[in-house]
Amino acid sequence: MEIKRIQAPLLPESKNLLALCFLCLTAFNGLILLLTLFTAFKINKIAERKTTFAQLVNGETIYVSEQERNWRYAAVIQKVVNDWTILTFNWDDKLTGTNQSDQGIQVGKNGRIPTNTWFASLLLEPKFAQASLPKIAELVPTGVFTGQLRSTTIISYLSEPRAVRLGEWEIDMVATRILVDRTTGRDERISFNRTFTVQAVEIPHSPLGKNAPLVEQKIYEMRSSGLQIIRMVEFNPQQRR
């Protein structure tokens, strides 16, 4: 006689569904745990960055936050480009903040540039500065040092910095240089539209601090942003639109 074996399910169908739900719930809780651990890790990394307040010499208190070595505020990058342009092309026969005549700084055999223009060159990569100064000297009329001519720069557009690689940004500028003849009142307006490439560098510190000569203090001040301009090319606003 043939005996038929009846294979019954280990659990009733309703209990199988309950077990499946339990497994899904366990997996979901595991995923939540992983996400929680990941979030906690990121929060701890942020918390490890030192945050403090600092008081400036003028009494102003500012918030200071530790960031990555090559990280820079967009406003700081813009300021470097702005400062270089203004200092390079704003020409007068007086030293800034004084009544003293500006005799300028000699460049090469016959070139001469205003003192502020020389300080602006500190914002350039050294080899780039060395190559640029003779060309800038060719733009400076001798009438600047006699007080006959004065130059002012108006910046009408400065883009947000675009990161091109780690610690390097591009920024576009639209500006106009205005050269005024004080004897005749006539002026010449020259477009100056450029795309700058700016690079993060180490921030230098003077070993003498406040005891350093004024010129040395000014040099370190110019480099205090930890940025230098490494390239300039013509910028066409129409091509960006």
Image: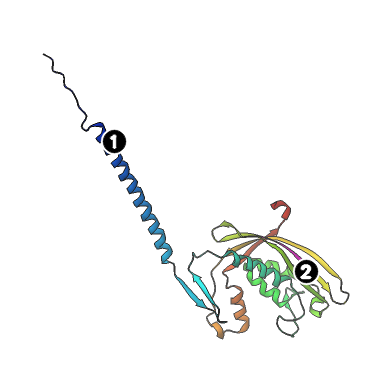
Residue at (87% x, 74% y) in the render = 185
Is 207 covered by the magenta stretch? no
The overriding secondary structure of the stretch rendered in magenta is strand
- Amino acid at the residue labelled 2: Leu
- Asked which secondary structure carries label 2, the reply is helix
Q: Which residues are magenta?
A: 172-176
Q: Position of residue 14 (x, y in %)?
A: 26, 34
Residue at (38% x, 52% y) in the render = 35
Q: Position of residue 118 (x, y in %)?
A: 69, 74
Q: Position of residue 62 (x, y in %)?
A: 53, 74
Q: Is residue 65 left or right of residue 173?
A: left
Q: Which mark is residue 17?
A: 1
Instruction: Name the quadrant containing residue 114.
Output: bottom right
Which of these two is toward me, 158 or 202? 158
Which of these two is toward me, 33 or 238? 33
Q: What's the distance in space between the residues labelled 1 and 2, CA to CA?
A: 85 Å
Residue at (71% x, 57% y) in the render = 235
Q: Residues within 10 Å of mark 1 (few under 14, many from 20)?
A: few
Residue highlighted by disc 2:
139
